[in-house]
């Protein structure tokens, strides 16, 4: 059993932890989204973001945009993925939200499957994409941590439970 309350990381200068969707907890306002795009065979699509490197598509929720809509948009902008499945699996809790926002916020984490991958737009902040097995990620992933590894393993468990019924 994972003790999510004690599994934390520092990401971009803030404390981060994960709360699975089945854990009843009040989450602060969502400001960002993270999209874990699975191929259904144990690989995840990583975007190669300028000045960061490889990571899951993610980004800020725009004003008046829902977290689901932000996940669909970020997945497309950063990886070219047109999503066919999208499931909320939990939230990252960030404290502080950012340098300019000292209060906590959350980042809903979605498990997704791509219907197709389109070419990246010329104005994308992504320099390319890569499908990677979990075992390959420590050498590839920007700011890899035990927390991020555990969230990917949790996503894989959820994928098996949701998509292989």
Image (cartoon, grey):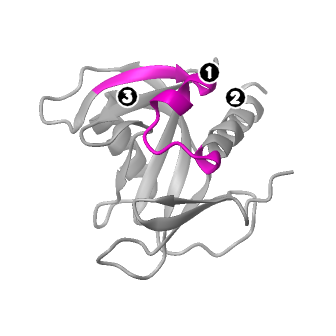
**In the image, is residue 46 above or below residue 22?**
above
Residue 39 screen position, x and y as percent? 55, 21
Which one is in front, 75 or 134? 134
**96 vs 139, nearest the viewer:** 139
The image position of residue 19, as x and y in percent, is 67, 61
**Residue at mark 3:** 81
Residue 80 seen in the current view: yes
Instruction: Tell me the distance, in whole angstroms, between the alpha carbons under discs 1 and 2.
Output: 8 Å
Q: Which mark is residue 122?
A: none
- Pointer 1: what residue? 40
**Residue drawn where x is 59% and y is 72% of the image:** 27
| Quadrant placement of the C terminus | top right
Q: Secondary structure at mark 3?
A: strand
For the residues marked 2 and 3, what is the alpha-carbon distance in whole angstroms? 18 Å
* Residue 137 % position (x, y): 54, 29
Marks 1/3: CA–CA distance: 14 Å
Q: Earlier in the sequence, mark 1 or mark 3?
A: 1
Residue 1 left/right relative to 70: right
Q: Which residue is mark 2?
A: 163
Lower sequence index among marks 1 and 2: 1
């Amino acid at each position: 059993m994972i003790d999510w309350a004690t599994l934390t990381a520092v990401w971009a200068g803030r404390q981060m932890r994960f709360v699975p969707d089945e854990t009843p907890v009040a989450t602060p306002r969502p400001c960002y989204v993270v999209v874990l795009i699975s191929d259904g065979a144990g690989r995840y699509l990583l975007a190669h973001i300028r000045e960061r490197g490889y990571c899951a598509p993610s980004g800020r929720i725009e004003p008046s945009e829902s977290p689901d809509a932000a996940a669909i948009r970020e997945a497309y902008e950063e990886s070219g993925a047109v999503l066919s499945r999208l499931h909320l699996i939990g939230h990252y809790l960030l404290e502080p939200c950012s340098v300019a926002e000292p209060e906590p916020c959350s980042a809903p984490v979605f498990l997704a499957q791509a219907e197709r991958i389109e070419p990246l737009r010329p104005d994308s902040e992504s320099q390319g994409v890569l499908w990677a097995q979990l075992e390959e990620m420590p050498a590839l992933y920007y700011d890899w941590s035990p927390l991020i590894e555990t969230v990917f393993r949790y996503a894989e468990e959820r994928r098996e439970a949701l998509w292989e019924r």
